[in-house]
Image (spheres, rainbow, N blue to C red):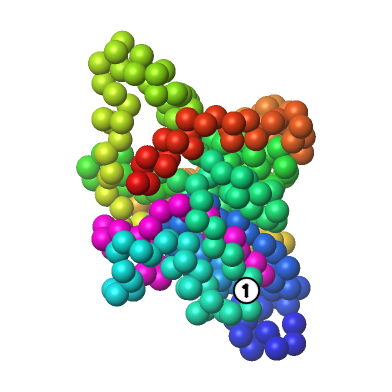
Amino acid sequence: MSGLSDRFDRNIRLFGEEGQRKLRETSAAMIGIGGLGSPLVQHLALLGVGGMTLVDDEELDETNRNRFVGARHDDPIPGSPKVEIAARLVREIDPAIRVTPVKASLISEEAFAAAKRADWVFGCFDEDGPRAILNELCAAYARPYVDLASDVPEPGVYGGRVCVAWQGAGCLHCLDALDPRDVEAYLSTDAEKAGRAAIYGVPVEALREAGPSVSPINGVVAALAATEFMVAVTGMREPQRLINYYGHMPKLTTARPKPDCYYCTGIRGKPDDADAERFLRMSHLRKRRLRKVR
């Protein structure tokens, strides 16, 4: 750790030189670089991780400026990919970190490859469909997966949660952190969605307006995720599997996973059995994402 001791002196006082070495030897893939992903990028860079692959297909827009850590007032809109802004932030914090920006969506060979290569994977999504896909991919390839979510379900209620799928002992499914209806809607074709809309009368998209999103709430969730990553990598303790943050109260709660989870035990470390790559063969997912980004 020679040459790094001064820079990380205050880190080392908490978890020791061996802990700092482990962080420096760890690589992370972060998929979804926005209001949650950008403060998480900052935390991991300050912790001194060795490498980061940043995956997102969107560019900065004016409504992101209230919460995107690292965005400058003069970053052009359009023309500023979120991954490039986050990569710039990493380099400004610590140029020794290997940072690779990837302008792609989750449903891409590039994103899947980044997740499979990384030591740890982080997901910051607005929908449960992408969460379910990345949860399964990480289970199949036995990668620790940290999922972040912020939420304002109704006026006056706000917070978020962090789920850590680690070593086959808890994941988004067995912790009941996914809405199966949301996952089904995400995976459905346009024809299937239209059929449901004809039956129930309300298109799924009509219920998905962009809600409130502010920097302090996102920052709490990102800090919780970075802390659970830190304690797991350095060996301070095992990470909590699920932390619920109720910012309006305020309080934190935790939960235990259900036993005999298919994803934690049935397909963990069995990529051929899981065939998570089947999502890449669902061309409607990629086409729908391209329409949304455009």
In percent of width and height, residue 179 lies at: 45, 29
Seen in the image, is 290 located left or right of residue 21? left
In percent of width and height, residue 15 lies at: 67, 72
The residue that appears at 63% across and 79% down in the rendered structure is: 96
Please tell me whether residue 53 belongs to the stretch shown in magenta. yes
In percent of width and height, residue 90 lies at: 52, 73
In percent of width and height, residue 113 lies at: 66, 49
Residue 10, quarter of picture: bottom right
Residue 223, can we see it?
A: no
* Range drawn in magenta: 50-71
Q: Nearer the viewer, residue 292 or 204?
A: 292
Q: Nearer the viewer, residue 204 or 80?
A: 80
Query: Against 188, is 74 above or below?
Result: below
The residue that appears at 68% across and 39% down in the rendered structure is: 139
Seen in the image, is 23 located left or right of residue 174? right
Quadrant location of the N terminus? Answer: bottom right
Residue 52, quarter of picture: bottom right
Query: Against 242, is 200 above or below?
Result: above
Please tell me whether residue 119 belongs to the stretch shown in magenta. no
The residue that appears at 74% across and 36% down in the rendered structure is: 271
Residue 174, quarter of picture: top right
Seen in the image, is 273 located left or right of residue 198? right
- Give the residue at mark 1: 97
- Look at the numbered disc 1 and give the secondary structure of its residue: loop
The residue that appears at 64% across and 71% down in the rendered structure is: 98
Q: Residues within 10 Å of mark 1 (few under 14, many from 20)?
A: some
Residue 232, can we see it?
A: yes
Kind of residue sitting beneath label 1: Ile
Query: Against 165, is 40 above or below?
Result: below
